[in-house]
Amino acid sequence: MRRLLYVVWLVAFGLGLWGVAERLLFGHRLAGYGSYVVWGLWVAIYIYMSGLSAGAFLLSSLVYVFRLERLERVGKLALFVAFVALLGGLLAIWFDLGRMERFYRVYTSPNFQSMMAWMIWLYTAYFVVLLGEAYLALRPDLVRWSRDPNRSPGQRTLARWLTLGRASLAPEVLERERRALQVLATVGVPLAVAFSGGVGALFATVSAKMYWHQAIVPILFLTGAVVSGGGLLTALAAFAWPQRDAEHRELVALLGRMLLLVVVGYVLLEWAEFSIPLWYGTSPEGHLVRLALFGPYWWVFWILHVGLGTLLPVLLLVLRPKDPTAVGWAGLLVAGTFVTVRLNVVIPAQVEPALRGLEQAFTGPRLVFHYFPTTHEWLVASFVVATTAALLWLGARLLPLMETEVAR
Amino acid sequence: MQEKGTAVQAKEARGSRRKFLRTLGAGAATLWALTVLEGQRAPAEAASGAAGADLPNEREGEDVLLRMQRDLQRALRKPAHLRRWAMVIDLRKCVGCHACTIACVAEYKLPPGVVYRPVVEEEIGTYPHVTRRFVPRPCMQCDNPPCVPVCPVNATYKRADGIVAVNYDQCIGCRYCIVACPYNARTFDAGEYYTDGTPERSAVEKTPSFEYGKRWTREHEAPPVGNARKCHFCIHRVEAGLLPECVTSCIGRATYFGDAADPDALVSELMHRPNAVRLKEELGLKPRVYYLL
């Protein structure tokens, strides 16, 4: 199984590298998005991964802000997942930029009227807090690892390097750091909420697209972040944990119960999102909702999202709540399929011409109101996912993310 | 005698041919000189405020282009912030020839996927009671433009004269402005050429365009490749004393352009007619393009 995963990763990464080379050599020419559907798969992956990040981070706040002791063991892992997922998301959106080399201008000449500028500055602040928090949470274990003869020389060196020269394990130092960590985590919560809600607001504030221009959209983004991030963390805790003892089973069961709760909560919000514009059949965005639900890509919603991403996990969580494997699969399904929810946010809003007949006024392959990602886009997406997975794997191997001794 | 007569006739014929060619030559030279002078003078005059001296006096039944040209030169004598460029499109006169679209594509050497002024064709009714309507759709240059505040890097902005401009040296290509436009008036330059896949770029594609008064080649992925692009009422032409391409190329004289702040301008007259409407007026964006129904 492990060998198969390595092979899959190698193939995904190799193909991904090809896609990245294409992106760098040919710009946007091989992509399927154009002038009317301008945001495609990479934007969906960006919002998906940034959601995973915010979700995992908010889960970590249960440990570092609210001191939920039963979850303490996943705190560091949650922080690292938040870090890596954000990097993956940023990588995806960087490839999507028309002019990649100008990304820094969002910092040098920001327009704070723009929700996009707000989102960027919020996630930058969030990123800084996240780094600080991860450092404080990991440092005691890093110091221990750097002195542990059972660790490989590489692990010891990396651990020593990451402590940034602070090797003290004195109780007063640890206590001071614990308090600092709590402060940082407390600051991080509103940042993560504002950042993930802000990604939703980026869409919701666009009055030109009725499909996005709904007050519930930022709330859905925030909740979706918790659902997908929670799912991923549940899966990691279930499958990647080194010990398989009673404590592990209890931890996974707790994560499973929490996941069930947020999934059901999300279903409720989603019901509101779709039922309201569909109820009388007279809403201006109703036909776009119908398109997403019953159009040519109906299976994305019904099979991938509702079937595999909601019903099956809920069944697993209800019927086998104490089985770590079942709960882990539920988490994996929820997290893995959540990208379809993001796709169903990004794409349908753009497939309607602003003026009837515009689609035939001046035609060309990029002047169309339909979209399906090209092979090139899938390849670049594969690179992003493979890189993120590799970072996670490296983190799990080289960092004390799943140490049972809690950094206090 | 007959031979002499023939020789005289031939000489006369040669003489009149020479005279004709001389006249033609002189006419062509005058025309060339006028064209060159016009081209050279317009920007200088626009700046000095001496524009309009070369236009014929107003007379009954003249081409509306002449009147708009006079309106334009009058507007250019004012400071930029007192001008309010506006466009009026008479839908009853538009025949759907798409000349404006093509003139615009030619002026800016627009690549595949980029269009500033498509003409939307709409079929109304069912046979036999059927008619067609043609709606040219330039950028509306909204006074309350939704595309401006969304730009994260201030690359798109509203100029003092009301034109919504894009700074190609600043745009990062995030395309947020494109989704924010409720008219689909912005497009994305993905870096393609019509001659992609052929042995050579066409001469036109190698020719620079002069949007916003700067030279843009698109060579080696240079801007505006990767940027959002849109109609700007040919502002570099306008500031040089020339009407926008879509106005001069309109065979039905259905598109009018001028300074809406000038009560004597033709556009002011037309936009205040009771049959003038704006697209999606209910959005409150205050577009500067008026349609006559």
Image: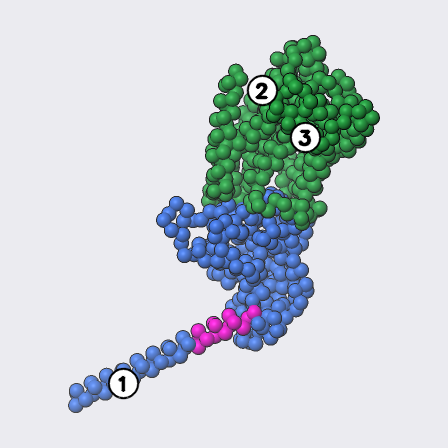
Chain colours: A green, B blue
From mark 1 to mark 3, how far is it between C-alphas?
103 Å
Q: The magenta stretch spans which residues?
A: B30-43
Q: Quadrant of residue A287?
A: top right
Residue B210 among those drawn in magenta: no
- Can you identify the residue that label 1 sits on? B12
Looking at the rendered structure, the kind of residue marked 1 is Glu
Name the subunit of mark 3.
A
Q: Secondary structure at mark 2?
A: helix
Report the magenta stretch's main SS: helix
| Residue beneath the point at 52% across and 59% down | B215
Say which of marks 1 and 3 sits in front.
3
| Residue beneath the point at 50% across and 41% down | A24
In the rendered view, does A112 fall on the left or right side of B64?
Answer: right
Q: Secondary structure at mark 1?
A: helix
Residue B230 position (above or below residue A81): below
- Can you identify the residue that label 2 sits on? A308
Residue A298 percent location from the top left of the image: 54, 27
Tell me, yes or no, whether dots 2 and 3 are on the same chain: yes
